[in-house]
Image (spheres, helix red, strand yellow):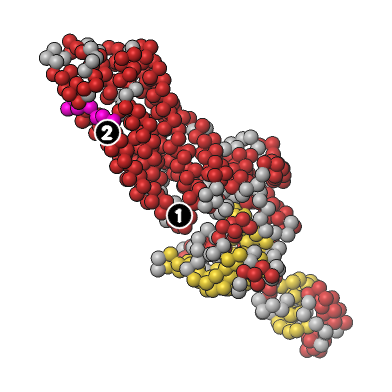
Protein backbone atom coordinates (compact mmCIF):
# COMPACT_ATOMS: atom_id res chain seq x y z
CA UNK A 1 0.00 0.00 0.00
CA UNK A 2 1.39 3.39 -1.03
CA UNK A 3 0.90 5.97 1.71
CA UNK A 4 1.22 8.88 -0.72
CA UNK A 5 -1.81 7.62 -2.64
CA UNK A 6 -3.78 7.05 0.58
CA UNK A 7 -2.85 10.60 1.66
CA UNK A 8 -4.03 11.92 -1.72
CA UNK A 9 -7.42 10.28 -1.24
CA UNK A 10 -7.67 11.59 2.34
CA UNK A 11 -6.75 15.09 1.15
CA UNK A 12 -9.43 15.10 -1.55
CA UNK A 13 -12.05 13.77 0.86
CA UNK A 14 -11.11 16.49 3.36
CA UNK A 15 -11.42 19.19 0.68
CA UNK A 16 -14.90 17.95 -0.14
CA UNK A 17 -15.95 17.65 3.50
CA UNK A 18 -15.04 21.27 4.32
CA UNK A 19 -17.08 22.44 1.31
CA UNK A 20 -20.16 20.50 2.44
CA UNK A 21 -21.87 22.85 4.89
CA UNK A 22 -24.41 20.29 6.04
CA UNK A 23 -21.66 17.83 6.86
CA UNK A 24 -19.54 20.45 8.61
CA UNK A 25 -22.54 21.53 10.69
CA UNK A 26 -23.27 17.94 11.65
CA UNK A 27 -19.66 17.54 12.79
CA UNK A 28 -19.33 20.84 14.67
CA UNK A 29 -22.70 21.50 16.37
CA UNK A 30 -23.30 18.26 18.36
CA UNK A 31 -19.97 18.38 20.25
CA UNK A 32 -20.84 21.85 21.49
CA UNK A 33 -24.10 20.46 22.87
CA UNK A 34 -22.41 17.35 24.28
CA UNK A 35 -20.04 19.58 26.25
CA UNK A 36 -22.59 22.17 27.37
CA UNK A 37 -25.33 19.75 28.45
CA UNK A 38 -23.36 17.67 31.00
CA UNK A 39 -21.91 20.84 32.51
CA UNK A 40 -25.37 22.36 32.86
CA UNK A 41 -27.00 19.18 34.17
CA UNK A 42 -24.03 18.42 36.44
CA UNK A 43 -24.47 21.88 37.95
CA UNK A 44 -28.24 21.82 38.40
CA UNK A 45 -29.02 18.17 39.19
CA UNK A 46 -26.49 17.59 41.94
CA UNK A 47 -29.20 17.69 44.60
CA UNK A 48 -29.65 14.74 46.96
CA UNK A 49 -33.14 16.02 47.90
CA UNK A 50 -34.27 14.40 44.65
CA UNK A 51 -33.32 11.02 46.16
CA UNK A 52 -34.83 11.27 49.64
CA UNK A 53 -34.66 7.56 50.39
CA UNK A 54 -31.05 7.37 49.23
CA UNK A 55 -31.89 4.40 47.00
CA UNK A 56 -30.24 5.81 43.90
CA UNK A 57 -27.10 6.79 45.79
CA UNK A 58 -26.89 3.29 47.25
CA UNK A 59 -27.34 1.68 43.83
CA UNK A 60 -24.72 3.91 42.25
CA UNK A 61 -22.17 3.34 44.99
CA UNK A 62 -22.80 -0.40 44.71
CA UNK A 63 -21.72 -0.35 41.08
CA UNK A 64 -19.06 2.33 41.56
CA UNK A 65 -17.49 1.85 45.05
CA UNK A 66 -14.76 4.32 44.14
CA UNK A 67 -17.38 7.07 44.37
CA UNK A 68 -18.20 6.28 48.01
CA UNK A 69 -15.94 9.07 49.21
CA UNK A 70 -17.99 11.66 47.25
CA UNK A 71 -20.72 13.73 48.91
CA UNK A 72 -24.31 12.52 48.21
CA UNK A 73 -24.96 15.55 45.94
CA UNK A 74 -21.78 14.79 44.03
CA UNK A 75 -22.73 11.12 43.62
CA UNK A 76 -26.00 12.11 41.99
CA UNK A 77 -24.21 14.67 39.79
CA UNK A 78 -21.59 12.03 38.90
CA UNK A 79 -24.38 9.58 37.98
CA UNK A 80 -25.91 12.19 35.69
CA UNK A 81 -22.52 13.01 34.16
CA UNK A 82 -21.86 9.32 33.53
CA UNK A 83 -24.92 9.15 31.26
CA UNK A 84 -23.16 11.56 28.90
CA UNK A 85 -20.33 9.13 28.36
CA UNK A 86 -22.53 7.52 25.70
CA UNK A 87 -22.73 10.85 23.89
CA UNK A 88 -19.00 10.67 23.41
CA UNK A 89 -19.52 7.29 21.73
CA UNK A 90 -22.26 8.64 19.51
CA UNK A 91 -19.92 11.29 18.08
CA UNK A 92 -17.42 8.84 16.59
CA UNK A 93 -20.39 6.77 15.39
CA UNK A 94 -22.47 9.28 13.47
CA UNK A 95 -19.69 11.42 11.99
CA UNK A 96 -17.93 8.57 10.11
CA UNK A 97 -21.34 7.25 9.05
CA UNK A 98 -22.28 10.67 7.64
CA UNK A 99 -18.95 11.18 5.88
CA UNK A 100 -18.75 7.67 4.43
CA UNK A 101 -22.31 7.74 3.12
CA UNK A 102 -22.02 11.26 1.69
CA UNK A 103 -18.71 10.33 0.09
CA UNK A 104 -19.69 7.02 -1.49
CA UNK A 105 -23.27 7.88 -2.45
CA UNK A 106 -21.95 11.20 -3.79
CA UNK A 107 -19.41 9.37 -5.94
CA UNK A 108 -22.13 7.04 -7.19
CA UNK A 109 -24.36 9.98 -8.09
CA UNK A 110 -21.65 11.90 -9.96
CA UNK A 111 -20.09 8.66 -11.29
CA UNK A 112 -16.65 9.88 -10.34
CA UNK A 113 -15.35 6.52 -9.13
CA UNK A 114 -14.84 5.05 -12.61
CA UNK A 115 -12.30 7.72 -13.52
CA UNK A 116 -10.51 7.14 -10.22
CA UNK A 117 -10.47 3.38 -10.73
CA UNK A 118 -8.97 3.91 -14.19
CA UNK A 119 -5.82 5.30 -12.56
CA UNK A 120 -3.09 3.08 -11.08
CA UNK A 121 -4.70 3.35 -7.60
CA UNK A 122 -5.33 0.06 -5.79
CA UNK A 123 -8.78 -0.43 -4.34
CA UNK A 124 -7.25 -1.09 -0.90
CA UNK A 125 -5.63 2.36 -1.06
CA UNK A 126 -8.92 3.96 -2.06
CA UNK A 127 -10.83 2.16 0.69
CA UNK A 128 -8.20 3.01 3.32
CA UNK A 129 -8.15 6.66 2.30
CA UNK A 130 -11.91 6.92 2.46
CA UNK A 131 -12.03 5.11 5.82
CA UNK A 132 -9.37 7.37 7.35
CA UNK A 133 -11.11 10.49 6.05
CA UNK A 134 -14.38 9.28 7.56
CA UNK A 135 -13.17 7.95 10.92
CA UNK A 136 -10.57 10.54 11.92
CA UNK A 137 -12.84 13.64 12.05
CA UNK A 138 -15.37 11.85 14.27
CA UNK A 139 -12.77 10.45 16.62
CA UNK A 140 -10.76 13.66 16.82
CA UNK A 141 -13.93 15.68 17.39
CA UNK A 142 -14.93 13.44 20.28
CA UNK A 143 -11.43 13.60 21.77
CA UNK A 144 -11.34 17.39 21.42
CA UNK A 145 -14.80 17.76 22.93
CA UNK A 146 -13.79 15.43 25.78
CA UNK A 147 -10.70 17.55 26.46
CA UNK A 148 -12.80 20.71 26.54
CA UNK A 149 -15.37 19.03 28.82
CA UNK A 150 -12.63 17.95 31.23
CA UNK A 151 -11.11 21.42 31.35
CA UNK A 152 -14.45 23.17 31.85
CA UNK A 153 -15.64 20.59 34.40
CA UNK A 154 -12.58 21.33 36.53
CA UNK A 155 -13.51 25.00 36.50
CA UNK A 156 -17.30 24.74 36.80
CA UNK A 157 -18.07 21.49 38.66
CA UNK A 158 -14.94 21.28 40.77
CA UNK A 159 -12.03 18.82 40.89
CA UNK A 160 -13.96 15.92 42.44
CA UNK A 161 -16.47 15.69 39.57
CA UNK A 162 -13.74 16.44 37.02
CA UNK A 163 -11.94 13.34 38.32
CA UNK A 164 -15.13 11.34 37.70
CA UNK A 165 -14.98 12.44 34.08
CA UNK A 166 -11.34 11.36 33.88
CA UNK A 167 -11.72 7.92 35.40
CA UNK A 168 -10.85 4.66 33.68
CA UNK A 169 -14.37 4.08 32.30
CA UNK A 170 -14.33 7.41 30.45
CA UNK A 171 -10.78 6.88 29.22
CA UNK A 172 -11.58 3.35 27.98
CA UNK A 173 -14.78 4.51 26.32
CA UNK A 174 -13.41 7.65 24.68
CA UNK A 175 -9.98 6.39 23.64
CA UNK A 176 -10.61 2.67 22.96
CA UNK A 177 -14.28 2.02 22.29
CA UNK A 178 -14.85 5.33 20.46
CA UNK A 179 -12.36 4.69 17.62
CA UNK A 180 -13.61 1.10 17.23
CA UNK A 181 -17.20 2.34 17.00
CA UNK A 182 -15.98 4.93 14.47
CA UNK A 183 -14.44 2.21 12.33
CA UNK A 184 -17.53 0.03 12.62
CA UNK A 185 -19.74 2.96 11.69
CA UNK A 186 -17.59 3.76 8.68
CA UNK A 187 -17.74 0.13 7.54
CA UNK A 188 -21.52 0.18 7.95
CA UNK A 189 -21.62 3.38 5.88
CA UNK A 190 -19.58 1.78 3.09
CA UNK A 191 -21.59 -1.45 3.06
CA UNK A 192 -24.97 0.30 3.07
CA UNK A 193 -23.88 2.99 0.59
CA UNK A 194 -22.92 0.34 -1.93
CA UNK A 195 -26.58 -0.74 -2.06
CA UNK A 196 -28.49 2.55 -2.04
CA UNK A 197 -28.35 5.81 -3.97
CA UNK A 198 -29.47 8.27 -1.31
CA UNK A 199 -27.13 9.41 1.46
CA UNK A 200 -30.02 9.97 3.89
CA UNK A 201 -31.37 6.48 3.34
CA UNK A 202 -27.85 5.09 3.81
CA UNK A 203 -27.52 6.99 7.08
CA UNK A 204 -30.86 5.74 8.34
CA UNK A 205 -30.00 2.14 7.56
CA UNK A 206 -26.40 2.47 8.76
CA UNK A 207 -27.69 4.17 11.90
CA UNK A 208 -28.27 0.75 13.45
CA UNK A 209 -24.67 0.96 14.70
CA UNK A 210 -25.88 3.59 17.17
CA UNK A 211 -28.38 1.19 18.73
CA UNK A 212 -25.86 -0.51 21.07
CA UNK A 213 -24.91 2.92 22.39
CA UNK A 214 -28.54 3.79 23.01
CA UNK A 215 -28.82 0.44 24.80
CA UNK A 216 -25.96 1.43 27.12
CA UNK A 217 -27.78 4.64 28.04
CA UNK A 218 -31.05 2.80 28.66
CA UNK A 219 -29.47 0.08 30.81
CA UNK A 220 -27.64 2.60 32.96
CA UNK A 221 -30.58 4.98 33.33
CA UNK A 222 -33.13 2.29 34.16
CA UNK A 223 -31.07 0.01 36.39
CA UNK A 224 -28.81 2.55 38.02
CA UNK A 225 -25.97 0.15 37.17
CA UNK A 226 -22.99 1.92 35.68
CA UNK A 227 -20.72 0.19 33.22
CA UNK A 228 -17.09 0.22 34.32
CA UNK A 229 -13.80 0.18 32.40
CA UNK A 230 -13.84 -3.62 32.20
CA UNK A 231 -17.17 -3.59 30.33
CA UNK A 232 -15.96 -0.88 27.95
CA UNK A 233 -12.76 -2.79 27.17
CA UNK A 234 -14.81 -5.96 26.63
CA UNK A 235 -17.16 -4.07 24.30
CA UNK A 236 -14.11 -2.73 22.45
CA UNK A 237 -12.81 -6.27 21.85
CA UNK A 238 -16.19 -7.61 20.74
CA UNK A 239 -16.88 -4.70 18.40
CA UNK A 240 -13.33 -4.87 17.01
CA UNK A 241 -14.01 -8.48 16.04
CA UNK A 242 -17.27 -7.45 14.40
CA UNK A 243 -15.31 -4.66 12.72
CA UNK A 244 -12.81 -7.14 11.23
CA UNK A 245 -15.68 -9.06 9.64
CA UNK A 246 -17.15 -5.75 8.45
CA UNK A 247 -13.84 -4.70 6.89
CA UNK A 248 -13.70 -8.03 5.04
CA UNK A 249 -17.22 -7.44 3.68
CA UNK A 250 -16.44 -3.81 2.78
CA UNK A 251 -13.20 -4.82 1.04
CA UNK A 252 -15.13 -7.32 -1.09
CA UNK A 253 -17.68 -4.67 -2.00
CA UNK A 254 -14.86 -2.27 -2.80
CA UNK A 255 -13.46 -4.49 -5.50
CA UNK A 256 -12.90 -2.61 -8.78
CA UNK A 257 -15.18 -4.88 -10.81
CA UNK A 258 -17.89 -4.95 -8.15
CA UNK A 259 -18.02 -1.16 -8.01
CA UNK A 260 -18.25 -0.83 -11.78
CA UNK A 261 -20.64 -3.64 -12.53
CA UNK A 262 -22.78 -4.20 -9.45
CA UNK A 263 -23.05 -0.92 -7.59
CA UNK A 264 -26.31 0.73 -8.55
CA UNK B 1 1.57 -13.70 -27.95
CA UNK B 2 4.03 -12.97 -25.15
CA UNK B 3 4.40 -9.56 -23.60
CA UNK B 4 7.87 -9.13 -25.00
CA UNK B 5 6.78 -9.98 -28.50
CA UNK B 6 3.85 -7.61 -28.20
CA UNK B 7 6.21 -4.88 -27.06
CA UNK B 8 8.54 -5.60 -29.93
CA UNK B 9 5.71 -4.86 -32.35
CA UNK B 10 5.73 -1.20 -31.37
CA UNK B 11 3.32 -0.22 -34.14
CA UNK B 12 0.52 -2.18 -32.47
CA UNK B 13 -1.10 -0.20 -29.65
CA UNK B 14 -3.96 -2.57 -28.86
CA UNK B 15 -4.40 -6.21 -29.72
CA UNK B 16 -7.20 -8.55 -28.71
CA UNK B 17 -7.59 -12.26 -29.29
CA UNK B 18 -11.03 -13.77 -28.80
CA UNK B 19 -11.77 -11.19 -26.12
CA UNK B 20 -15.09 -11.66 -24.37
CA UNK B 21 -16.89 -10.70 -21.21
CA UNK B 22 -19.96 -12.22 -19.68
CA UNK B 23 -22.21 -10.89 -16.92
CA UNK B 24 -24.03 -13.84 -15.44
CA UNK B 25 -25.30 -15.81 -18.42
CA UNK B 26 -25.30 -12.81 -20.74
CA UNK B 27 -22.33 -12.15 -23.00
CA UNK B 28 -21.78 -8.39 -23.37
CA UNK B 29 -18.93 -8.95 -25.84
CA UNK B 30 -17.54 -12.10 -27.37
CA UNK B 31 -14.84 -13.22 -29.76
CA UNK B 32 -13.26 -9.84 -30.40
CA UNK B 33 -10.16 -10.04 -32.55
CA UNK B 34 -8.69 -6.62 -33.21
CA UNK B 35 -5.43 -4.82 -33.84
CA UNK B 36 -5.05 -1.06 -33.50
CA UNK B 37 -2.00 0.71 -34.82
CA UNK B 38 -0.24 3.29 -32.68
CA UNK B 39 -1.54 6.77 -33.51
CA UNK B 40 -4.76 5.44 -34.99
CA UNK B 41 -8.18 6.89 -34.17
CA UNK B 42 -10.53 3.94 -33.94
CA UNK B 43 -14.28 4.33 -33.61
CA UNK B 44 -16.54 1.83 -31.89
CA UNK B 45 -20.03 2.14 -33.28
CA UNK B 46 -23.07 0.31 -32.06
CA UNK B 47 -26.44 0.74 -30.41
CA UNK B 48 -26.95 1.07 -26.66
CA UNK B 49 -26.05 -2.18 -24.93
CA UNK B 50 -23.89 -3.32 -27.86
CA UNK B 51 -20.84 -3.79 -25.63
CA UNK B 52 -18.93 -0.59 -26.38
CA UNK B 53 -18.48 0.45 -22.76
CA UNK B 54 -17.69 -3.14 -21.76
CA UNK B 55 -15.00 -3.22 -24.46
CA UNK B 56 -13.49 0.05 -23.21
CA UNK B 57 -13.56 -1.21 -19.63
CA UNK B 58 -11.87 -4.45 -20.68
CA UNK B 59 -9.15 -2.61 -22.60
CA UNK B 60 -8.69 -0.08 -19.79
CA UNK B 61 -8.13 -2.98 -17.37
CA UNK B 62 -11.11 -1.91 -15.28
CA UNK B 63 -12.76 -5.30 -15.57
CA UNK B 64 -11.27 -8.65 -16.46
CA UNK B 65 -12.14 -10.75 -19.51
CA UNK B 66 -14.23 -13.90 -19.22
CA UNK B 67 -12.40 -15.34 -22.22
CA UNK B 68 -9.64 -14.35 -24.60
CA UNK B 69 -6.79 -11.94 -24.04
CA UNK B 70 -5.87 -8.35 -24.77
CA UNK B 71 -2.69 -6.32 -24.76
CA UNK B 72 -2.48 -2.56 -24.44
CA UNK B 73 0.92 -1.08 -25.27
CA UNK B 74 2.21 -4.64 -25.07
CA UNK B 75 0.87 -5.14 -21.53
CA UNK B 76 -1.61 -7.89 -20.73
CA UNK B 77 -4.81 -6.25 -19.46
CA UNK B 78 -5.51 -9.17 -17.14
CA UNK B 79 -2.13 -9.92 -15.58
CA UNK B 80 -0.60 -6.42 -15.79
CA UNK B 81 -3.70 -4.36 -15.07
CA UNK B 82 -1.96 -1.82 -12.81
CA UNK B 83 0.66 -1.14 -15.49
CA UNK B 84 -1.98 -0.88 -18.22
CA UNK B 85 -3.74 1.86 -16.25
CA UNK B 86 -0.53 3.92 -16.23
CA UNK B 87 -0.56 3.90 -20.04
CA UNK B 88 -4.17 4.83 -20.66
CA UNK B 89 -6.41 7.82 -20.18
CA UNK B 90 -10.17 7.46 -20.12
CA UNK B 91 -13.08 9.79 -20.59
CA UNK B 92 -15.98 7.94 -19.03
CA UNK B 93 -19.56 8.11 -20.28
CA UNK B 94 -20.25 10.94 -17.81
CA UNK B 95 -17.55 13.46 -16.82
CA UNK B 96 -17.58 12.18 -13.22
CA UNK B 97 -15.95 15.26 -11.72
CA UNK B 98 -15.77 16.16 -8.06
CA UNK B 99 -18.23 19.02 -8.25
CA UNK B 100 -17.28 20.72 -4.96
CA UNK B 101 -13.61 20.85 -5.97
CA UNK B 102 -12.25 23.49 -8.31
CA UNK B 103 -11.08 22.62 -11.82
CA UNK B 104 -7.46 22.81 -10.68
CA UNK B 105 -8.12 20.65 -7.60
CA UNK B 106 -9.85 18.02 -9.74
CA UNK B 107 -6.83 17.79 -12.01
CA UNK B 108 -4.37 17.94 -9.12
CA UNK B 109 -6.05 14.93 -7.47
CA UNK B 110 -5.72 12.79 -10.58
CA UNK B 111 -2.18 14.00 -11.26
CA UNK B 112 -1.22 12.88 -7.76
CA UNK B 113 -2.85 9.48 -8.31
CA UNK B 114 -0.65 9.12 -11.40
CA UNK B 115 2.39 9.92 -9.25
CA UNK B 116 3.38 13.18 -10.93
CA UNK B 117 5.70 15.38 -8.86
CA UNK B 118 4.68 18.88 -7.76
CA UNK B 119 6.44 20.79 -10.54
CA UNK B 120 5.13 18.47 -13.26
CA UNK B 121 1.64 18.64 -11.79
CA UNK B 122 1.60 22.43 -11.78
CA UNK B 123 2.95 22.62 -15.33
CA UNK B 124 0.55 20.05 -16.78
CA UNK B 125 -2.49 21.48 -15.01
CA UNK B 126 -1.78 24.93 -16.42
CA UNK B 127 -1.02 23.54 -19.90
CA UNK B 128 -4.22 21.51 -20.19
CA UNK B 129 -6.46 24.13 -18.61
CA UNK B 130 -5.11 26.68 -21.07
CA UNK B 131 -5.43 24.21 -23.97
CA UNK B 132 -9.11 23.72 -23.21
CA UNK B 133 -9.70 27.38 -22.45
CA UNK B 134 -10.45 26.77 -18.76
CA UNK B 135 -7.49 28.52 -17.15
CA UNK B 136 -9.49 31.59 -16.17
CA UNK B 137 -11.98 29.31 -14.38
CA UNK B 138 -9.36 27.19 -12.62
CA UNK B 139 -10.44 28.24 -9.13
CA UNK B 140 -14.16 27.77 -9.75
CA UNK B 141 -15.96 24.67 -8.50
CA UNK B 142 -16.48 22.13 -11.28
CA UNK B 143 -20.14 22.00 -10.31
CA UNK B 144 -20.59 25.54 -11.66
CA UNK B 145 -19.37 24.57 -15.15
CA UNK B 146 -21.52 24.03 -18.25
CA UNK B 147 -21.76 20.52 -19.73
CA UNK B 148 -19.23 21.36 -22.43
CA UNK B 149 -16.76 22.77 -19.91
CA UNK B 150 -17.15 19.71 -17.70
CA UNK B 151 -16.49 17.47 -20.67
CA UNK B 152 -13.38 19.45 -21.57
CA UNK B 153 -12.16 19.26 -17.99
CA UNK B 154 -12.76 15.50 -18.03
CA UNK B 155 -10.75 15.20 -21.25
CA UNK B 156 -7.95 17.25 -19.66
CA UNK B 157 -8.07 14.85 -16.70
CA UNK B 158 -7.69 11.89 -19.05
CA UNK B 159 -4.62 13.46 -20.67
CA UNK B 160 -2.77 14.83 -17.63
CA UNK B 161 -0.31 11.96 -17.38
CA UNK B 162 0.20 12.00 -21.16
CA UNK B 163 -1.08 8.49 -21.84
CA UNK B 164 -0.22 6.85 -25.14
CA UNK B 165 -3.77 5.49 -25.51
CA UNK B 166 -6.95 7.43 -24.80
CA UNK B 167 -10.44 5.95 -24.52
CA UNK B 168 -13.29 8.38 -25.13
CA UNK B 169 -16.69 6.96 -24.27
CA UNK B 170 -19.35 9.01 -26.06
CA UNK B 171 -17.55 12.31 -25.61
CA UNK B 172 -20.21 14.46 -27.27
CA UNK B 173 -23.33 12.68 -26.04
CA UNK B 174 -25.86 15.06 -24.48
CA UNK B 175 -23.89 18.15 -25.48
CA UNK B 176 -25.36 21.07 -27.39
CA UNK B 177 -23.91 21.65 -30.87
CA UNK B 178 -21.48 24.32 -29.69
CA UNK B 179 -20.11 22.21 -26.84
CA UNK B 180 -19.94 19.15 -29.12
CA UNK B 181 -17.98 21.20 -31.65
CA UNK B 182 -15.50 22.27 -28.97
CA UNK B 183 -15.03 18.68 -27.81
CA UNK B 184 -14.58 17.42 -31.39
CA UNK B 185 -11.95 20.10 -31.96
CA UNK B 186 -10.20 18.88 -28.82
CA UNK B 187 -10.23 15.32 -30.16
CA UNK B 188 -8.83 16.52 -33.49
CA UNK B 189 -5.96 18.15 -31.60
CA UNK B 190 -5.25 14.85 -29.83
CA UNK B 191 -5.13 13.12 -33.17
CA UNK B 192 -2.56 15.65 -34.28
CA UNK B 193 -0.49 14.79 -31.19
CA UNK B 194 -0.16 11.19 -32.38
CA UNK B 195 -2.07 9.45 -29.61
CA UNK B 196 -3.98 6.25 -30.17
CA UNK B 197 -7.64 7.02 -29.58
CA UNK B 198 -10.55 4.65 -29.12
CA UNK B 199 -13.76 6.60 -29.60
CA UNK B 200 -17.14 5.14 -28.63
CA UNK B 201 -19.93 7.05 -30.28
CA UNK B 202 -23.46 6.92 -31.61
CA UNK B 203 -22.72 9.85 -33.86
CA UNK B 204 -22.03 8.51 -37.35
CA UNK B 205 -20.85 11.84 -38.77
CA UNK B 206 -18.50 12.26 -35.86
CA UNK B 207 -17.08 8.78 -36.43
CA UNK B 208 -16.67 9.42 -40.16
CA UNK B 209 -14.93 12.72 -39.53
CA UNK B 210 -12.60 11.71 -36.73
CA UNK B 211 -11.81 8.02 -37.18
CA UNK B 212 -9.22 6.28 -39.32
CA UNK B 213 -11.16 3.05 -38.92
CA UNK B 214 -14.53 2.13 -37.54
CA UNK B 215 -15.56 -1.06 -35.83
CA UNK B 216 -19.24 -1.97 -35.68
CA UNK B 217 -20.10 -3.84 -32.50
CA UNK B 218 -23.16 -5.62 -31.29
CA UNK B 219 -22.18 -8.28 -28.80
CA UNK B 220 -19.20 -8.97 -31.04
CA UNK B 221 -17.09 -7.10 -33.53
CA UNK B 222 -19.15 -7.26 -36.73
CA UNK B 223 -17.02 -5.34 -39.19
CA UNK B 224 -13.95 -3.11 -39.23
CA UNK B 225 -12.89 -0.78 -42.01
CA UNK B 226 -12.08 2.81 -42.86
CA UNK B 227 -15.04 5.17 -43.24
CA UNK B 228 -14.21 5.54 -46.94
CA UNK B 229 -14.12 1.80 -47.62
CA UNK B 230 -17.30 1.29 -45.62
CA UNK B 231 -19.03 3.83 -47.80
CA UNK B 232 -17.54 2.36 -50.95
CA UNK B 233 -19.15 -0.99 -50.17
CA UNK B 234 -16.97 -3.47 -52.08
CA UNK B 235 -14.05 -1.13 -51.69
CA UNK B 236 -14.15 0.09 -55.31
CA UNK B 237 -14.86 3.83 -55.51
CA UNK B 238 -17.63 4.94 -57.82
CA UNK B 239 -18.61 8.17 -59.60
CA UNK B 240 -22.08 9.17 -60.71
CA UNK B 241 -22.12 10.97 -64.08
CA UNK B 242 -25.16 12.96 -65.09
CA UNK B 243 -25.67 12.96 -68.88
CA UNK B 244 -27.46 15.27 -71.25
CA UNK B 245 -28.82 12.27 -73.19
CA UNK B 246 -28.70 8.49 -72.72
CA UNK B 247 -25.46 6.97 -74.04
CA UNK B 248 -25.16 5.24 -77.34
CA UNK B 249 -23.40 1.84 -77.45
CA UNK B 250 -20.17 3.25 -78.93
CA UNK B 251 -20.06 5.92 -76.22
CA UNK B 252 -20.50 3.25 -73.56
CA UNK B 253 -17.73 1.19 -75.18
CA UNK B 254 -15.44 4.23 -75.09
CA UNK B 255 -15.99 4.53 -71.35
CA UNK B 256 -15.37 0.82 -70.79
CA UNK B 257 -12.11 1.08 -72.72
CA UNK B 258 -10.81 3.95 -70.59
CA UNK B 259 -7.84 2.94 -68.42
CA UNK B 260 -8.80 2.82 -64.72
CA UNK B 261 -12.47 2.03 -65.34
CA UNK B 262 -13.35 -1.12 -63.40
CA UNK B 263 -17.04 -1.39 -64.21
CA UNK B 264 -19.83 0.62 -65.82
CA UNK B 265 -23.46 0.43 -64.87
CA UNK B 266 -26.59 2.35 -65.65
CA UNK B 267 -28.80 3.84 -63.02
CA UNK B 268 -32.58 3.57 -63.03
CA UNK B 269 -32.51 6.87 -64.87
CA UNK B 270 -30.90 6.47 -68.36
CA UNK B 271 -29.36 9.92 -67.89
CA UNK B 272 -27.27 8.58 -65.02
CA UNK B 273 -24.11 6.54 -65.51
CA UNK B 274 -22.41 4.82 -62.55
CA UNK B 275 -18.70 4.15 -63.14
CA UNK B 276 -16.47 2.21 -60.76
CA UNK B 277 -12.87 3.40 -60.88
CA UNK B 278 -9.54 2.16 -59.63
CA UNK B 279 -8.79 5.59 -58.16
CA UNK B 280 -11.24 8.46 -58.08
CA UNK B 281 -8.74 11.32 -58.35
CA UNK B 282 -6.62 9.65 -61.00
CA UNK B 283 -9.27 8.13 -63.25
CA UNK B 284 -12.23 10.52 -63.16
CA UNK B 285 -10.77 13.17 -65.55
CA UNK B 286 -9.83 10.52 -68.16
CA UNK B 287 -13.29 8.96 -67.96
CA UNK B 288 -15.04 12.31 -68.47
CA UNK B 289 -12.63 13.15 -71.31
CA UNK B 290 -13.42 9.81 -73.02
CA UNK B 291 -17.15 10.51 -72.76
CA UNK B 292 -16.82 14.01 -74.20
CA UNK B 293 -14.53 12.83 -77.03
CA UNK B 294 -17.14 10.15 -77.85
CA UNK B 295 -19.73 12.90 -78.21
CA UNK B 296 -21.60 12.52 -74.92
CA UNK B 297 -22.92 15.56 -73.08
CA UNK B 298 -21.79 15.58 -69.44
CA UNK B 299 -23.82 17.73 -67.06
CA UNK B 300 -22.11 16.81 -63.80
CA UNK B 301 -19.88 14.35 -62.01
CA UNK B 302 -19.79 13.52 -58.33
CA UNK B 303 -18.41 10.82 -56.12
CA UNK B 304 -21.07 8.29 -55.25
CA UNK B 305 -20.83 6.79 -51.79
CA UNK B 306 -23.30 5.20 -49.45
CA UNK B 307 -23.97 7.09 -46.27
CA UNK B 308 -22.41 5.68 -43.13
CA UNK B 309 -25.95 5.43 -41.79
CA UNK B 310 -26.83 3.05 -44.62
CA UNK B 311 -23.73 1.00 -43.82
CA UNK B 312 -24.63 1.02 -40.13
CA UNK B 313 -28.09 -0.44 -40.71
CA UNK B 314 -26.72 -2.89 -43.26
CA UNK B 315 -24.18 -4.19 -40.74
CA UNK B 316 -26.59 -4.15 -37.80
CA UNK B 317 -29.29 -5.68 -40.00
CA UNK B 318 -32.25 -3.85 -38.49
CA UNK B 319 -33.24 -0.66 -40.19
CA UNK B 320 -36.26 0.72 -38.27
CA UNK B 321 -39.58 0.58 -40.14
CA UNK B 322 -41.34 3.91 -39.92
CA UNK B 323 -44.46 3.40 -42.05
CA UNK B 324 -46.73 3.31 -39.02
CA UNK B 325 -45.66 6.75 -37.85
CA UNK B 326 -47.54 8.54 -40.61
CA UNK B 327 -50.86 6.86 -39.79
Q: Residue at x 66, y 51 (%)?
A: B161
B267 left or right of A172? right
State how far apart marks 1 and 2 are (Cα): 38 Å
Could you tell me which chain the residue with mark 1 belongs to? A
- Residue A230 is labelled as 2
Q: Which residue is mark 1?
A: A255
Q: Is residue A139 visible?
A: yes
Provide the residue span drawn in magenta.
A221-231
For disc 1, the neighbor class at 10 Å (few under 14, some 14 to 19, many from 20) is some
> Is A121 placed above or below B249 here?
above
Element carrying mark 1: loop
Q: Nearer the viewer, residue A75 or A211?
A: A75
Q: Position of residue A57 (x, y in %)?
A: 18, 18
Q: Nearer the viewer, residue B77 or B223?
A: B77
Q: Nearer the viewer, residue A191 or B256?
A: A191
Q: Position of residue B305 (x, y in %)?
A: 69, 72
Q: Quadrant of residue A171?
A: top left
Q: Residue at x 39, y 15 (%)?
A: A152
In the rendered structure, does residue A225 fall within the stretch colored magenta?
yes
Amino acid sequence: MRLSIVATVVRREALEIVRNRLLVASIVIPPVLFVALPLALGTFTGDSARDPGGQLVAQVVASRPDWASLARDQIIAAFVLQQFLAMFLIMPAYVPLSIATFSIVGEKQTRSLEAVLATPIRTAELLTGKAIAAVVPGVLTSWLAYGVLLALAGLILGPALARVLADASWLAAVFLLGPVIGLLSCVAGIVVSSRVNDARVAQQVGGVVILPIVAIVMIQAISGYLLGPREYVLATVVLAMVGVVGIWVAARLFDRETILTRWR
Amino acid sequence: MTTSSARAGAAIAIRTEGLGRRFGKLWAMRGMDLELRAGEVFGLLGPNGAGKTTTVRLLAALIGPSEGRAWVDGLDVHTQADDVRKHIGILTETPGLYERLTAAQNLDFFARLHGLDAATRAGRIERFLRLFDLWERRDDAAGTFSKGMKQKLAIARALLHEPSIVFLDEPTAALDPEAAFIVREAIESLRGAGRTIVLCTHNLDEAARLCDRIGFVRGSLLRVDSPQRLRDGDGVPMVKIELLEPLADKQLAAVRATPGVVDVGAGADPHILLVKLGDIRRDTPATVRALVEAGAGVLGVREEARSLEAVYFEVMGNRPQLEGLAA
